[in-house]
Amino acid sequence: MSVLYEIICFFFVLYLKKKSLIRFNHDNFLTLPEADLQQWLIGIALREGYAVEEVEYNFVDAETLFSLNKKYLNHETHTDIITFDYSESKAIKAEAYISLDALKKNAAIYSQTIENECLRLISHALLHCMGHNDKTKEEKKQMRLKEEDCINLFHVKH
């Protein structure tokens, strides 16, 4: 990419950051700086032609997420994340609920750090809001590739 493009993106991200509202609700769980996560999420959206208007990430226990899954999606299963997407056009508005228990378990199963698994789930919610799905085997494969790209982007910038 050209230097001019990078400079334009940097200032555009700064502009969007002032207009965006990204919240993380947790009990001292996140070890990654929230400001860095916000900038990263805005950059991911920008790369795909979206703007983040308002996103709230809620870190909850497994039973709370199971209850939400059952009540709102009629699923009788545990999951690691649920995203409620209220986006209109290219303006992202959403609520995401992440199971801390599943996050930690997945990190151990897939030999990932807690931080990388956290980045995977946070980006997963945003990717859903931008039209990426994971219902079929091929969609799951593409989603994993997108998540890995997002994780790598965070580490390159931070």
Image (cartoon, rainbow, N blue to C red):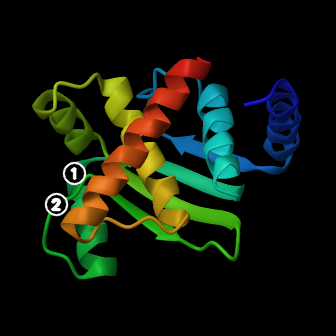
| Viewer-nearest residue: 27 or 5 | 5
Say if 1 sits above or below 53 in the image: above
Q: For the view shown, which residue lies furthest in the front direction?
A: 2
Q: Residue 53: x, y in percent?
A: 73, 59
Which labelled disc corresponds to residue 62? Answer: 1
Q: CA distance from mark 1 to mark 2?
A: 7 Å
Q: Residue 20: x, y in percent?
A: 76, 50
Q: Earlier in the sequence, mark 1 or mark 2?
A: 1
Residue at 36% over, 28% down = 116
Q: Residue 115: x, y in percent?
A: 38, 25
Q: Residue 125: x, y in percent?
A: 45, 55
Residue 75 in view of the camera: yes
Give left or right: position of 155 versus 12. Answer: left
Q: For the view shown, which residue lies furthest in the bottom direction?
A: 74
User: The residue under label 2 is which amino acid type?
Assistant: His
Residue tagged 2 = 78
Number of residues whose C-alpha sits closer than 10 Å to that of mark 1, classed few (under 14), some (14–19) or many (20 or more): some
Give left or right: position of 23 versus 131. Answer: right
Residue at 53% over, 65% down = 129
Residue at 22% over, 51% down = 62
Say if 77 sits above or below 89 in the image: above
Q: Are marks 1 and 2 in contact (CB under 8 Å)?
A: yes
